[in-house]
Amino acid sequence: MNQHIHLKTACHIVLFLLFSLSIYAQQYYVRGEIKDESGNVLQNVTILQHKTGYLFKSGNSGTFGIVINQQIDTFSFSLEGYQKVKMVVNADNYVNVKLKLLPASASNQRRDKLASLTRDLQKEEQRSWFTGDETYASLLENHFVNARKFPTTGMSLDVDRASYSNIRRFITLKSLVPPDAVRIEEMLNYFNLNYKEPLGQDVFNIKTTLSACPWNPDNQLFYINLCSKKLNLDTLPPSHLVFLIDVSGSMDMPNRLPLLQSAFRLLVNNLRDKDSVAIVVYGGITGVMLNTTSGAEKEKILRTLDELTPGGSTPGEAGIKLAYSVAKNHFIKGGNNRVILATDGDFNVGMKTEDELDELISQERSSGIYLTCLGVGMGNYKDSKIQTLANKGNGNYAYVDNFKEAEKVLLKEFTQTLYAVADDVFMNVEFNPEYVKEYRLIGFDNKVGALRDSLSVIEGGEIGSGHSMLAMFEIVPTEINKGAIKDNFTTGKLADIKLQYQHPNDTVGCNYNTTCRFEFIPFAELEPSYHFSAAVAMFGSLLRSSPFLKNIGWNEIISLAEESSGKDDLIQKEFISLVQQAKVLYSKGKKKKGGGLF
């Protein structure tokens, strides 16, 4: 009898499990499209599925398709510069979503950050730069603008260099680089080219150079080389660092948490006795793993790092809030107070969208606490989340793809990464239309959503100790310009440069202004570093399939880099190898496409 009851019970359990599996196995497909009020398709709209917390993006034609486990589900649709829409959708119906622009008067709304801004150039005019269905990247490459109508362009300056190491990861894995991952200004930042120490008590040194454009002989290339002063490590004020480490399940890979543990070990070994560290983690647990500890107790800090293990979800919001709370409670007045966030960017509990993270971190910007972001093992979409945090958190961003990169960022470039010499750094360049007919800023490309957003603004960035950055403009010369070169005329004014910044922990604005005289140097006579930087810019442009480099191929880039790289510079030699790998990778893709395989 008992055996019969047990058998009957077992059958009921099996039937229940089979029924449950049949329910979960049933899937539905939600399809739809997203447009603005004028009927224009909207690409890269963030789509949040409320039940699961998963994020999706609309495609290059504004359409989307999502597999769900129930016929009716709830989604939110958001895009920078537009009002968020929340909808209950039925998988039986094609979903039409219309997003409305945020009103221009909504001063309390979050404002998008621009990388560069040309004064008086209306966003309506920039709409002609959009390529509709042909573009799938959210970054829109800067085009030529008329120097007489719009002589002034400004750009936000920082030490971010994550794009280059992220590109390296894609190519090393024999994968094509998403155009949105290519940020040329960060690629140039990576090499710290042509550093020259500022004089005396100056925070910055600016040198400008005008030469021929190597990819277009009819045009010119205008370089602006900005260098920041070097801080003496021995006399630096004490630091309080909060390591905010993602220990969620997605970090359970050799190139994620273990790599970060090795990276932080390098940083700990650089700490002085007067420095201090706290360790906060988020994942299966969110909490303080190490209370604020002196840099003298390195073994204690290292032991805590070594004991970290991955698991669980990714409650990024809770981790960020806790880390800032710890930083505030142990704030050192006049010191270097910084949160170092290390993650793959895969936030899936709490705040998840870039807009929500942006709002959260912007609230902490004025607290005097800097934010350094270290990204690992992620795809391009997650890269954008971490870039948002770094930009809004008054900080910088590096992508760590291997131990050598960790060594570069946290050991060799220790002061650049962790010690700011200036905040809210912003540079205006005003061209003289007598010499410049048109100009194009290379890099510093804006997100499509930021250009569409009528409320978008430009904010300055953070510059670290001993940093050298190169900004580049491609110039269409006037007839007066050409005649001045022919007659060797060098007394005219090419441009005015105005640098605005603040000293760390200070709200008083500072200015550094300089006038650039018209002085043309033939490309062959430039220092090798300028040739190499041109090769880096060409590489980025080719990866983005830029329409402005129609007659340049991989061989020209390799040749220019080889002739200008330092014999003992391993980083520059690695760049040449990377371009060679890209040549094979992209050439293979073209051959396949021509053969009808794609």
Image (cartoon, rainbow, N blue to C red):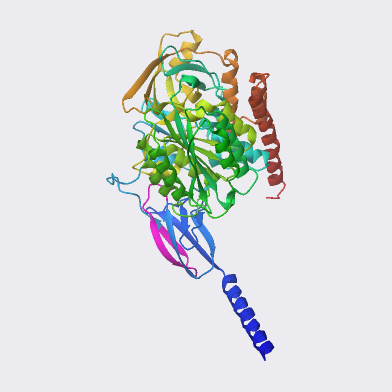
Observer-nearest residue: 70 or 486? 70
Q: Which residues are magenta?
A: 79-97
Residue 101, how many percent across, how many down?
Answer: 35, 50
In the rendered image, residue 90 lying in the magenta stretch gets the answer: yes
Which quarter of the picture shows residue 336?
top left
Q: Is residue 84 left or right of residue 263?
A: left
The answer to whether residue 182 of the structure is visible from this angle is no
Observer-nearest residue: 199 or 586? 199
Q: Residue furthest left?
A: 105
Observer-nearest residue: 393 or 132? 393
Observer-nearest residue: 279 or 375? 279
The correct choice, above or below, for 91 with respect to 463 in the image is: below
Q: Is residue 506 left or right of residue 538?
A: left
The answer to whether residue 217 of the structure is visible from this angle is yes
Residue 292, how many percent across, how many down?
Answer: 46, 38
Which quarter of the picture shows residue 333?
top left
Q: What number of labels is visible? A: 0
The correct choice, above or below, for 216 with respect to 456 in the image is: above
Q: Quadrant of the N terminus?
A: bottom right
In the rendered image, residue 549 lying in the magenta stretch gets the answer: no
Residue 453, how many percent across, how many down?
Answer: 37, 44
Residue 321, how many percent across, how many down?
Answer: 42, 46
Which quarter of the picture shows residue 117?
top left
The correct choice, above or below, for 442 with respect to 252 in the image is: above
